[in-house]
Image (spheres, helix red, strand yellow):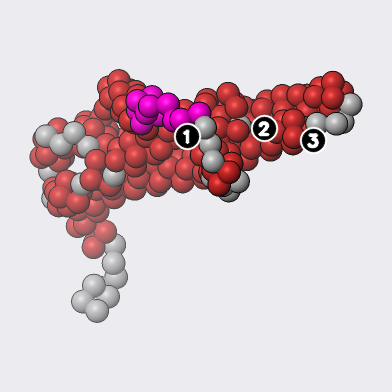
Amino acid sequence: MSFLRSKTRLLVVGVVVLFTLMAPELWAQEAPAAATAEEVAAPTTLMDMIIGGGVFMLPIGILSLWMITLAVFVSLQLSRKKYIPSGLKEDILAYMSEVRVRSSIDAAAQDPSYLGRMVVSSYPMVDATDPESLGRDKVEDAIADFSARENLGPMVFIGYFSVIAQGATMLGLFGTVAGMVLAFDSMGLSGGSDPGALAKNISLALITTAGGLVVAIPSIFLFYFFKNRFNRLVSDAQHVVIQGLDAAVATVNADQMLARVPEGIAET
């Protein structure tokens, strides 16, 4: 399965993105210790807020990079071309309308798409001795078995978005609890005389909460978006296979169906 074979590539891409973003900080020379009054009074930037979140922001940042890398990877994998190529769809419907089951299987065998593999797995179950349905029940069972096998790989990757959402939320909550504990601890030690330390610890609590939600909310959205997209592609592929079978059944029974039409109606 292409999804399973791509795990190593996904990991490598994530590591490269992570080190690319971290490189400027790792290579930058230490700034002069002396700071001017203007620098001290400078407004807090987004990077300052992230750094102020403490060590809890590092795993949250890693999860955000994982989310972005995974979103790009899954988006490329769930392309309609890889699931239902228009050319293969037209060939299958054309062959099956002429009851050329073997030609449909041969054409599908040359295409590595999801639809191609489904046709190869299901159309050999077509029963020529059953002209009424051409073994429809067996074909549908083969489609269900194929989907159960093939759908596992993509859903594993899509499920990672749920893991990221839950992990980011829990890390944000953990940072919140840690920040509040430090805030009350500093308040007790200073007797409430050091509002700066108290504000810093409360800031840690709030920033980690916000950071976790910033990662978790898009992850939840991406989970349902890609899950629905995948289910739609699978459903469309199954529909094409059944549509081809229906076309073959209609061709086989065309004369019988026409014979059942009362005289004079067929011409209208």
Which residue sits furthest right? Answer: 191
Depth check, front residue: 193 or 227: 193
Residue corresponding to mark 2:
204
Q: Earlier in the sequence, mark 3 or mark 1?
A: 1
Give amino acid for label 2. Leu
Give amino acid for label 3. Pro
Q: Quadrant of residue 6?
A: top left
> What is the CA distance from the residue labelled 3 to the residue labelled 2?
14 Å
Depth check, front residue: 160 or 197: 197
Q: Quadrant of the C terminus?
A: bottom left
Q: Give the residue at x 60% y 27%.
A: 54
Q: Give the residue at x 69% y 36%.
A: 203
- Relative placement, left or right, of 72 versus 213 is left
Magenta region, residue range: 23-33
Residue corresponding to mark 3:
195
Give amino acid for label 1. Ser
Label 2, secondary structure: give it.
helix
> What is the CA distance from the residue labelled 3 to the residue labelled 1?
32 Å
Q: Earlier in the sequence, mark 2 or mark 1?
A: 1
> What is the CA distance from the residue labelled 2 to the residue labelled 1?
19 Å
